[in-house]
Image (cartoon, helix red, strand yellow):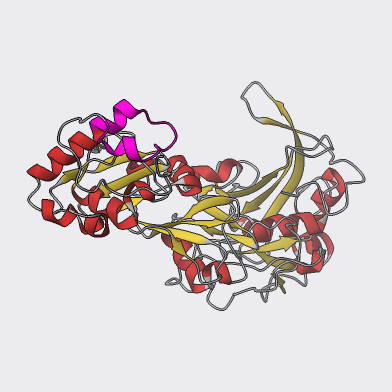
């Protein structure tokens, strides 16, 4: 009666030729998926490999088998014939338990990676990747899927530099890669975090901090902000932005589910410090409201006007996600400013303050029209049940009020309006004269 196959071990004293009734397959059951012919061939190859190995004595018994040969030696793994595992990949494979590990048996010989430098070998449950700079490491299951999404070794993550590591919380795992990158897994999915976003996340406690685990890879920001190279990761408790364009003193701010909610962690101490380039995080909000935005009183000398000049009075200031403060002027219907967007376009103050305070602007070159538009903030909501596609807020950085005999400080907001998904002949969204009235609570711009 054959002994059952429980766990793989190398063949002890393998036969160098097929001897009927004397092969390992004659005394032990085979693992599922293998035939006796394959097993007998593998045993003969095992004996031939050991005979040629400089370290064949190291594999004279199952107990010493995993000490194995020198890194240059190749081994095959019974009952799989015709596939050999060699070098550093073999050393890693043996250290995990060889065919008795979670990888099981090889399904290929060693392969050259597309970069021409690294190597990989596939196994039943995943590959082992090797490069001279990173060593040999398996990448499997959710980690492999996340790595694949990010372009494997040719993508921004590069090669793996560790095996999977259990995180301090005892729940999740991570795997380190080149380029200050890592893939984090928890329960059912894995996502990549890297570069400046990961650096900031680490300073906030990484997965044990208020943000928790990542819920996306590093991705482009939404809509038209992508043209500036702005990147983001979303996490369980919020998100982080990175903006490489010079001019922003902070490289990120979370776009929360409710863009008008009060943040618990403002982290505003050095927003205007040129040397501060870290991403900014905010904890999960608790309740929406127009008073939640980062606003302040207006600069001295920007209000107190009366009569025809009253429209130039600065009512308040709001700071955008890049740290720039903007003046919100009283304005007038049919003209510009707060009263213009309220009366002419039915836009509420809270939406304007929320959008400016939460988003990065597009940087528009002054055109000479509409007082030299310089910055535009656009939010879209393709899931809105309303016939409203977005809200654009136009800001002006020029001293356009100088000719009116008022202060020459930064002018500020010009207009805000809604537009719909329909495109015109220039493939631009069609503006509508009025936003829907009434608008849904909190505005239509939830993510």
Residue 329 picture location, percent across and down? 74, 61
- Judge from the rendering whether residue 295 lies leftward or rightward of residue 173; answer left or right: right
Most distant residue in the bottom direction: 269
Q: Nearer the viewer, residue 355 or 68?
A: 68
Most distant residue in the front direction: 1
Residue 79, compared with residue 349, is above or below; it is above
Q: Residue at x 60, y 51 (%)?
A: 188
Q: Which image quarter holds the N terminus? A: top left
Q: Residue at x 83, y 44 (%)?
A: 345
Boundaries of the magenta span: 21-41
Q: Quadrant of residue 244?
A: bottom left
Tag count: 0
Residue 288 picture location, percent across and down? 81, 63
Residue 422 picture location, percent across and down? 73, 26
Q: Nearer the viewer, residue 182 or 436?
A: 182
- Judge from the rendering whether residue 251 lies leftward or rightward of residue 56; answer left or right: right
- Judge from the rendering whether residue 86 lies leftward or rightward of residue 418; answer left or right: left
Q: Is 22 covered by the magenta stretch?
A: yes
Q: Residue at x 61, y 24 (%)?
A: 426
- Judge from the rendering whether residue 337 lies leftward or rightward of residue 100; answer left or right: right
Q: Quadrant of residue 389?
A: top right
Is residue 47 at all visible to an observer of this figure?
A: yes
Q: Nearer the viewer, residue 110 or 31?
A: 31
Residue 179 picture location, percent across and down? 34, 56
Most distant residue in the right direction: 438
Q: Quadrant of residue 95?
A: bottom left
Residue 262, compared with residue 107, is above or below; it is below
Q: Is 14 covered by the magenta stretch?
A: no
Q: Nearer the viewer, residue 333 or 187?
A: 187
Is residue 106 at all visible to an observer of this figure?
A: no
């Amino acid at each position: 009666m054959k002994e059952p196959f429980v766990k793989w071990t190398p063949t002890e004293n393998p036969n160098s030729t097929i001897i009927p009734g004397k092969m390992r397959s004659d005394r032990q059951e085979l693992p599922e998926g293998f035939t006796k012919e394959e097993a007998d061939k593998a045993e003969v190859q095992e004996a031939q490999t050991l005979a040629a190995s400089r370290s064949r004595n190291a594999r004279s018994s199952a107990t010493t088998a995993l000490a194995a040969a020198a890194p240059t030696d190749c081994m095959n793994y019974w009952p799989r014939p015709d596939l050999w595992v060699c070098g550093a990949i073999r050393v890693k494979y043996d250290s995990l338990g060889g065919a008795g590990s979670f990888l099981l048996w090889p399904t290929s010989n060693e392969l050259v990676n597309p970069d021409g430098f690294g190597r990989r070998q596939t196994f039943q449950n995943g590959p082992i990747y090797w490069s001279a700079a990173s060593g040999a490491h398996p990448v499997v299951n959710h980690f492999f899927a996340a790595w694949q999404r990010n372009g494997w070794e040719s993508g921004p993550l590069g090669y793996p530099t560790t095996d999977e590591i259990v995180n301090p919380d005892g729940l999740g795992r991570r795997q380190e890669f080149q380029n200050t990158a890592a893939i984090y897994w928890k329960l059912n999915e894995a996502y990549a975090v890297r570069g400046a976003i990961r650096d900031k996340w680490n300073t906030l406690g990484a997965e044990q901090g208020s943000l928790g685990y990542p819920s996306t890879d590093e991705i482009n920001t939404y809509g038209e902000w992508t043209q500036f190279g702005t990147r983001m990761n979303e996490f369980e408790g919020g998100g982080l932005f990175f903006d490489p364009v010079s001019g922003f003193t902070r490289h990120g701010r979370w776009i929360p589910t409710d863009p008008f909610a009060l943040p618990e962690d403002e982290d505003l101490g050095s927003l205007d410090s040129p040397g501060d380039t870290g991403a900014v995080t905010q904890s999960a909000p608790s309740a929406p409201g127009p008073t939640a935005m980062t606003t302040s009183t207006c600069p001295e000398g920007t209000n107190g006007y009366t009569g025809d000049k009253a429209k130039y009075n600065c009512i308040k200031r709001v700071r955008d996600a890049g740290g720039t403060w903007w003046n919100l002027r009283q304005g007038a219907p049919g003209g510009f400013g707060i009263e213009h967007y309220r009366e002419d376009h039915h836009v509420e103050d809270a939406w304007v303050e929320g959008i400016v305070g939460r988003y990065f602007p597009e940087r528009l070159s002054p055109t000479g029209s509409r007082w030299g538009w310089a910055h535009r903030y656009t939010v879209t909501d393709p899931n809105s049940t309303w016939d409203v596609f977005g809200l654009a807020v136009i800001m002006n950085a020029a001293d356009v009020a100088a000719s009116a005999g008022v202060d020459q400080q930064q002018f500020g907001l010009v207009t805000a309006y809604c537009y719909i998904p329909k495109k015109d002949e220039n493939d631009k969204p069609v503006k509508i004269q009025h936003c829907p009235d009434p608008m849904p609570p909190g505005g239509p711009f939830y993510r």
